[in-house]
Structures are given as structure tokens and as C-alpha cells.
């Protein structure tokens, strides 16, 4: 399994108002908007950040999203490591397969792969 991308997820009360600061100050552009989450990136998509009000299908907001090439392998590794699974392995309607685990410090990690 290979990590493809690591992206911070910031919980915000107003996506639109918060998004504008990142666009104006950092020159990022919107690459995804689902209403409850917006992802901003530079032109090369190397640097990204997501702003989220409330996750649409999970019980908590993650602190970070980590895209991997094999989310099923990552899930098995998390279960084998006896990590707390906060959101089960799920196929989401916006085209990702993902799960959340909590690390020892309580950080919630969204591990995902884009569905083909």
C-alpha cells in the first residue's frame, strides 16, 4: 500500500467565508465543493486543504485525509493493529471508498481511495 496524498481537514462553521481567505491570501483555487466540504489546491494540485462543516456520512469530522492506493489493505492493517475504527469502510456517493480510525492521541484519520 502506498500513500498518495496527505491533506489537512479544518472544521469550520462557514465554508464560504473561510474559503475566501485561502483563495485571497494563498492563491488557492477550489477543486471540489460538496456544500459541507470544500477542497482548495494550488494549480499543480500538490498542496491541498479541505474545509468542512459536518461530515455528511460519518459521526465526526476527521483531522486529516490520507489517500492511499489500496484502502482495503489499509483497513485490514488498522483492524490488525486494533485501532479504534470511528467510521466503517464505506463506499461514498461522491466517488471514494474510505474509513476513519482514531490514533492514540484521539486524532481522527480519514483513509481513502478514489473508486475507479
Image: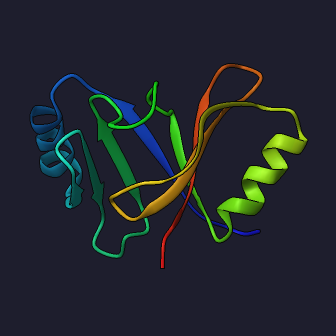
Which residue is pictured at 35% across the width and 76% down the height?
44
- Is any atom of residue 28 visible in this view? no
Q: Residue at x 71, y 19 (%)?
A: 105
Horizontal and vertical percent position of residue 19: 17, 42
Q: Nearer the viewer, residue 72 or 29?
A: 72
Q: In the shown orientation, is residue 76 left or right of residue 103? A: right
Q: Where does the image place residue 93, in percent across and percent down from the top left?
A: 34, 57
Give the quadrant of the N terminus: bottom right
Above or below, 15 against 23 in this view is above
- Residue 62's x, y, as percent? 49, 33
Query: Which residue of the protein is positioned furthest toward the bottom in this rendering?
Result: 116
Q: Is residue 37 above or below residue 54?
A: below
In screen coordinates, is 80 left or right of 14? Answer: right
The reply to whether residue 49 is in sight is yes
Q: Quadrant of residue 69?
A: bottom right
Residue 113 quadrant: bottom right
- Is residue 46 left or right of 56 when viewed as pictured? right
Q: Is residue 73 above or below residue 21?
A: below
Residue 28 x/y as whole percent: 23, 58
Given residues 49 and 97, the one toward you in this image is 97
Residue drawn where x is 32% and y is 37% of the image = 56
Quadrant in which residue 61 is drawn = top left
Q: Is residue 14 left or right of residue 47?
A: left
106 and 60: which is toward the camera: 60
Amino acid at each position: 500500500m502506498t500513500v498518495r496524498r496527505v491533506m489537512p481537514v479544518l472544521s469550520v462553521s462557514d465554508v464560504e467565508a473561510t474559503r475566501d481567505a485561502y483563495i485571497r491570501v494563498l492563491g488557492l483555487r477550489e477543486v471540489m465543493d460538496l456544500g459541507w466540504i470544500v477542497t482548495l489546491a494550488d494549480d499543480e494540485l500538490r498542496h491541498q486543504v479541505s474545509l468542512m462543516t459536518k461530515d455528511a456520512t460519518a459521526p465526526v469530522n476527521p483531522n486529516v485525509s490520507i489517500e492511499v492506493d489500496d484502502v482495503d489493505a489499509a483497513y485490514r492493517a488498522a483492524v490488525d493493529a486494533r485501532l479504534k475504527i470511528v467510521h466503517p469502510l464505506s463506499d461514498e456517493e461522491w466517488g471514494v471508498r474510505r474509513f476513519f480510525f482514531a490514533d492514540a492521541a484521539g486524532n481522527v484519520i480519514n483513509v481513502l481511495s478514489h473508486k475507479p
